[in-house]
Amino acid sequence: MVFGNGKIRVWKREPNEFGRRFEIRDIKGLFRKHITIEAGTKALFLQGGRFAGELPPGTYKDIGGVIKAWRIDIAEKATVILVDVGDVSLDMHIEDLLTKESVHVGVSGNVTIQAEAQELNKLFSNLMKGRELLEIHDVEVLLEGEMKNILQAKVKDCSVKELYGNLELKKELEQDFEHQMKTTLERTGLKLVQVPAVEFVFPEDIEEIVKRRGGLHVKEEDIIIQERELELQERKLKLKEKEEELKAKKREIEKKGEIDELKVKKEVEEEKRKLEVIEPEGEIKIPAHAPKIVVLSGVNAGKEYLVEEDGIGIGRNGSNKVVIDNNDLSASRFHAKVFFKNGEYFFQDHSANGTRFGSRTVRKETTKLQSGAVFEVGKTSKTRLQFIHGNISDAAPGETVMPGVPPQPPMPELPIPIEVNISEQEVQINRESKIYVSIENKSNQTISDVTLSSEFSNKLVVKNDKILIGRLLPGDITEEYWIVDPIAKGIFSIKPGLSYTDENGNLQREDGFKPGRIVVLEIEPKPEPPVPISATVKIINGANKGEEYPLDKIAITEDIRIGRCHACEIRMDENDRTASRHHARLLFENGAYFIEDTWSRNVTKVDGREINEKTRLRDKNRIEIGRAVLSFSERERTITVRDGRGMDTIRLDEIRRRRDIRIGRCPVCEIRMDEKDRTASRHHARIIFEDSEYFIEDICSADGTFVNGVVIEEKKRLEDGDEIKIGHILMQFRRVVMGG
């Protein structure tokens, strides 16, 4: 709306207005006056339907000059649109969405949008075409049909029960709705700012609907149990008749003096075996068609385990439902998990050595299970297991079902059930060691900023007491480790703790996990640390393109990890799912760098070839981690000495064992000058290794130390090709390719 008192004109919108339009030729006289654009409103100018400029709230004395600067010709078609300077909230009330059972549900919430200045031509030609005023309610009506179509496309494939209690499905609907609404709004010149949680509106009798549909399943199980009872009674009757027949035969044989008790006993056992009778104990077990894992061979051969609603764990750790022989170290502590999702069963491998399905080995991946599938865990015990699946029983795992009594509903899941287990509750060490711990997200929520911490005894140094794990999806299991270094003998404790951010953005803290005991009987002397060679890894594509990692500047422990996990020394893009959390590792052994795949999902390649074992890296090798490509560069530092005796090349990275390398005539110097050259001092200079770089420093020599013809007064970093002069001797510092 345009108001005025003759001197100052005020441009403003009403609270219910989304946009108001007027033509400049109708108000061109106003441009010779002062104009105030009220707070909360901005003026967008168009020439010929295209965006020309924008004025924020404020008072303007020379509006005509501004329009001229934008080259707006008021004689031609020029337009001003007044819109909200900030975000606009739209009420979303969608009704009559049909589920796959044709039940009517609705959706309510608020969608926050904003007018895009650079897309005004779309707003002008689509929403405001032929309108002088566009109210917020008009926008809601115009977008309601689009929003309903988007939601109906998803809801039609879902049942009422799924919509009523499935948080994962709800989150998936929200993400899909947000993606499609962005595309729809872009076509009309609007920007989607925020979509809140989608809230479903159910009929008042929704509890009865869910109960009624769930009751069909209960009745089906009752019928199965009754059929089982009748079958059992029929077999008992046949067995009794057969036993009577055999007893009569036995009496007949006894009369004839031809009794053979062993033969009769054998016949009775044979008949029992044929009838496969299960002796009743007053209760009916869960029907045989329930989903279960059967151990075919191994320490628990013959045992059966029901697949629980939230899955069943397999591994050497005692907290798993299916426990593998603890002496078989080729099987992991938390080897795998079988779980149910979207009407199907899946096998998820978490192990180091994989699981064999016939001739195929599954490692660090999830595969769909079919009834009858046989898989093998471990190389020593070769534990063989079989998955058998029929209609799922509603009985709780491990319980029995009394005839005619419906099963009890499962206990509600905790808000964020997280399981933390130290792999071995008591560990004996005598040197720096790794203490492994597993973290499992057993909830149906995604948790972020997960950090594992530890409380420990004073004389047990934990070098990485806080481990940043990052994000864990529902069902994710990750295994981390603390590096502990004992400084005294004794028995110490290490207690895990966990902090994380839940899906509502709240910071949570979990303690009370079972601590582990560290027993130190002796302390072993620490070995000489490895001497790193100058080498770098550089990421040459993707989101982290250009990041460079000098390997000899990274602390050399056992390995340098590569992956998406925050704890990795070389971090991949967290959003690149083709790279695993712990994808590969670099090792420094015997003066060379090696790379090894750590059971990644999408393998590791060097120069285009998949690696299946530890592989030596050489200069200019290309490493593929998922979609990311890394280049490996290796250079050796040398000093070339030229004197009257000839030329000698000294490999600095090989002779470095202390903090410095001495140069002089003294026999103890690592680089010895000619003893007859009195222009060189006995202890003339030294080369220092700091932060993976070499520096040279004069140590009070008589004639000084020269680098590139200039005498040095203080410590100087050596660059490739630098010439060093000590007395009459010339030396050159070089970075050369290994072996070159």
Image (spheres, grey):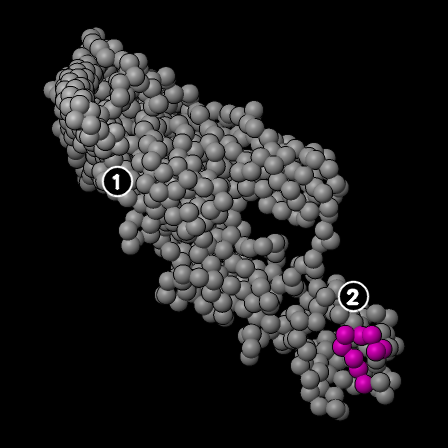
Spot occupied by residue 47 in the image (x, y as percentages of width and height): 23, 40
Query: Which residue position holds label 2?
Result: 714
Main SS of residues in magenta:
loop
* On-image quarter of the C terminus: bottom right
The residue at the point 25 percent across, 10 percent down is 405
Between residue 57 and residue 153, name the one nearer to us: 153
The residue at the point 48 percent across, 50 percent down is 571
Name the kind of residue labelled 2 in the image.
Answer: Glu
Span shown in magenta: 666-674
Q: Quadrant of residue 143?
A: top left
| Relative vertical location of residue 421 with respect to residue 618 in this rendering, above or below | above
Numbered circle sitting on residue 369: 1
Q: Residues within 10 Å of mark 1 (few under 14, many from 20)?
A: some
Spot occupied by residue 526 in the image (x, y as percentages of width and height): 71, 54
The residue at the point 87 percent across, 85 percent down is 678
Q: Quadrant of residue 311?
A: top left
| Relative vertical location of residue 169 with respect to residue 655 in this rendering, above or below | above
Q: Is residue 527 magenta?
A: no
Residue 217 visible to an observer of this rendering: no
Q: Are marks 1 and 2 in contact (CB under 8 Å)?
A: no
Spot occupied by residue 90 in the image (x, y as percentages of width and height): 27, 21
* On-image quarter of the N terminus: top left
Name the kind of residue labelled 1 in the image.
Answer: Leu
Judged from the image, the secondary structure of the residue bearing numbered disc 2 is loop
